[in-house]
Amino acid sequence: MRSLDSRNPGSVAEPESELGCPAVSLPELVPVSVIVPTLNEADNIEPLLARLERVLPAGSEIIFVDDSDDETPAVIRSIQQQARHPIRLYHRLPHQRAGGLGGAVVAGLRVARSPWACVLDADLQHPPELIPCLLEEAMRTGADIAIASRYRSSSEDVGGLTRLRAAVSRALVTATRLLFWRRLREVTDPLSGFFLVRTAAVNCQSLRPRGFKILLEILVRHPHLRTVEVSFQLDRRHAGRSKASLREGMRYLVHLTALRLSRPYSGTAARGWESEASRELQVPSARRWSGEHEELGD
């Protein structure tokens, strides 16, 4: 895996953009499906879309998989007609929200139409301006996943978190890497919620998401995917409240245990899981979305 940390003594110095990404010039960036899982993020939707619209390549789409009980879907609808890029909204009913945020991301991956999918949070802690950088690096290096890493840099400041949360986050990342050392020895931030993945490289039927850490699920169950990392710092949440909680922490420990006890699945090793995964996650297939969920922008 190739790192973008220019402070690595063995690396070759390259010109960088303001976000720390090498100034790579591509003739044309390919379209991206941006997947945004949302849970009561009404106040963040408008600024998020404004920033996404400025940086996405032509032909891209924005997919909201929404588990909200507030006005988030209404806000998305109100903006959809004026958007430069197609916006698709999938509102999951309460009984269809199994898997939490991870289940929402898998639902988005199932219906993504672009060759690349970028997952990021709606609260603007993940800067949308980094998406072209992730895409450029993935294409330039031949990687299947480009990860926005909080820990690739030598800086102790990951940004956007209190000292306690930053310490807990770093400890969890360290413990996770030790548990899956063979797979994650070159991945500094397997718990990142901000990443770009080649859609054809992921077999959604092999994924068994529980809670927030869908990237770890993808990495462990697809051990042969090539990765690259781009350093970044979390921004502060724009509005609303964090969804992190003790319950989510316990959910992560259950998820971690299940992953550790299961044998890794590659993208082609999960044959026969389709019906089982669909039942467990209660995530409709692409053919069922239109009948059970509202879709915008088609």
Image (tube, rainbow, N blue to C red):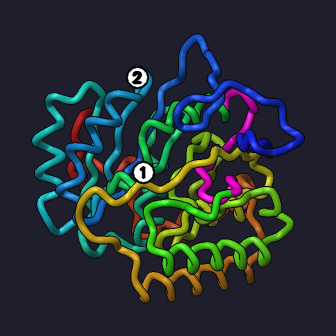
Is 79 situated left or right of 142 in this image? left
Nearer-N-terminus badge (1/2): 2
Residue in the picture at 12% in, 59% down: 71
Q: SS for tag 1?
A: helix
Q: Callout 2, which amino acid?
A: Gly
Question: How many numbered callouts?
Answer: 2
> Which residue, as the protein is rendered here, is positioned at the far top?
27
The boundaries of the magenta stretch are 139-154
Residue 121 spot, x, y in % from top left: 40, 55
Please identify the quarter of the rendering in which residue 201 is found: top right
Give the labeled residue for mark 1: 108
Label at residue 59: 2
Is 106 situated left or right of 245 in this image? right
56 or 153, which is in the foreground?
Answer: 153
Q: Is residue 274 magenta?
A: no
Q: Residues within 10 Å of mark 2 (few under 14, many from 20)?
A: some
Residue in the picture at 48% in, 26% down: 31
Q: Callout 1, which amino acid?
A: Gly
Residue 32 spot, x, y in % from top left: 47, 33
Residue in the picture at 26% in, 47% down: 89
Quadrant occupied by the C terminus: top left
Q: Is residue 260 visible?
A: yes
Q: Is residue 277 above or below residue 9?
A: below
